[in-house]
Image (tube, rainbow, N blue to C red):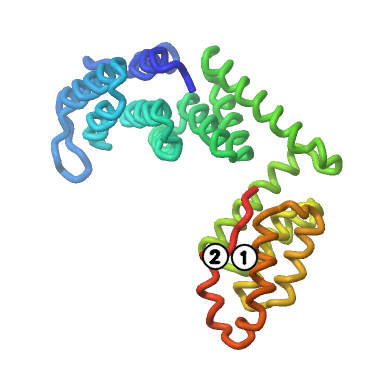
């Protein structure tokens, strides 16, 4: 992420086509909001200034508290969200940072720096495909030279990571890998929502392309086990371990399955209790 002092300067003076977004002369002091309430723009500006001063003094938590009091109807709320996201990054609270960078993108999807921040946070979370998508969106918006350089550095980091990941997958190109990651993560979401059949479709797609995906086979084993299809579960867990005998989630799930076979046959209802005990693989 940007150096905080520099980021604060950019946030509070962000420009598009050379025009200062924060031009009080062009804004009324108060405006009507959609719910009929009166929004005091001047008060919002003063609160933002206070948040910036607190952040510049390294009082990050207090700055976040202050900035969160600015209503979402504030015309430059994306600036507020971006600053909050940056402060959460300084506190190493990346999930919270992600939430606010995502809010900034939704509030102003035409500002390249928002996409860069969101992409960098995705990469920190291990979402390579999403990071790649955000970086490309930032470039498509014709960013200034400073942001463009940062986006290009982000893409370089992504490409280096892809080279490492694909070193042992000669039959898979970067574009295919990114697509597999998207399908895999979608499968995990379906698993979390107990949409077993949709999850199976996603993981089977992954294994049809990457036949050495121990994680995809391991997740299929978990799904079939929770569906009560013991033989299919055992087959896929064993396949996962054949590919990677050191893959811990599949190993533990396979051992659990072996111990519980008879219990499951006697009481299929016990499967519901297993969900929190089984381990899922992530891309």
Q: Is residue 68 above or below residue 255?
A: above
Residue 69: x and y in percent read 21, 34
Residue 248: x and y in percent read 67, 54
Res. 15 in view: no
Q: Between 94 and 78, which is closer to the camera in this rendering?
A: 94
Q: Is residue 76 above or below residue 4?
A: below
Q: Residue at x 55, y 12 (%)?
A: 145
CA gap between label 1 and label 2 equals 22 Å
Dot 1 lies on which element? helix
Q: Between 167 and 267, which is closer to the camera in this rendering?
A: 267
Q: Is residue 194 above or below residue 282?
A: below
Location of residue 164 (image quadrant): top right
- In this rendering, the count of numbered labels is 2
Of the image marks 1 and 2, the number of the one nearer the N terminus: 1
Q: Looking at the image, is mark 1 or mark 2 nearer the viewer?
A: 2
Bin the neighbour count of mark 2 within 10 Å (Cα to Cα): few under 14, some 14-19, many 20 and up.
Answer: few
Residue of label 2: 277
Residue 227: x and y in percent read 62, 75
């Amino acid at each position: 992420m940007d150096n905080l002092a520099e980021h604060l300067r950019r946030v509070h003076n962000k420009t598009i086509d050379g025009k200062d977004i924060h031009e009080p002369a062009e804004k009324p002091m108060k405006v009507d909001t959609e719910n009929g309430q009166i929004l005091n723009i001047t008060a919002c500006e003063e609160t933002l200034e206070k948040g910036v001063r607190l952040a510049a003094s390294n009082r990050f938590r207090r700055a976040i508290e202050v900035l969160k009091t600015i209503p979402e109807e504030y015309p430059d709320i994306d600036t507020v969200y971006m600053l909050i996201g940056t402060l959460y990054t300084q506190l190493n609270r990346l999930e919270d940072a992600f939430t606010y960078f995502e809010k900034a993108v939704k509030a102003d999807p035409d500002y390249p720096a928002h996409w860069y921040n969101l992409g960098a946070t995705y990469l920190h979370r291990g979402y390579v495909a999403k990071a790649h998508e955000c970086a490309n969106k930032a470039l498509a918006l014709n960013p200034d030279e400073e942001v463009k350089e940062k986006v290009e550095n982000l893409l370089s980091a992504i490409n280096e990571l892809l080279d490492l990941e694909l070193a042992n997958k000669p039959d898979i190109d970067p574009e295919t890998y990114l697509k597999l990651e998207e399908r895999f993560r979608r499968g995990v979401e379906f698993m979390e929502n107990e949409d077993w059949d949709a999850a199976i479709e996603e993981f089977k797609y992954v294994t049809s392309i990457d036949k050495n995906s121990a994680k995809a086979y391991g997740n299929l084993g978990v799904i079939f086990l929770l569906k009560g299809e013991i033989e299919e579960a055992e087959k896929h867990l064993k396949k996962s371990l054949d590919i990677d005998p050191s893959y811990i989630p599949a190993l533990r799930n396979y051992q659990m399955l072996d111990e519980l076979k008879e219990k499951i046959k006697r009481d299929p209802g016990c499967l519901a209790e297993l969900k929190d005990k089984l381990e899922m693989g992530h891309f």
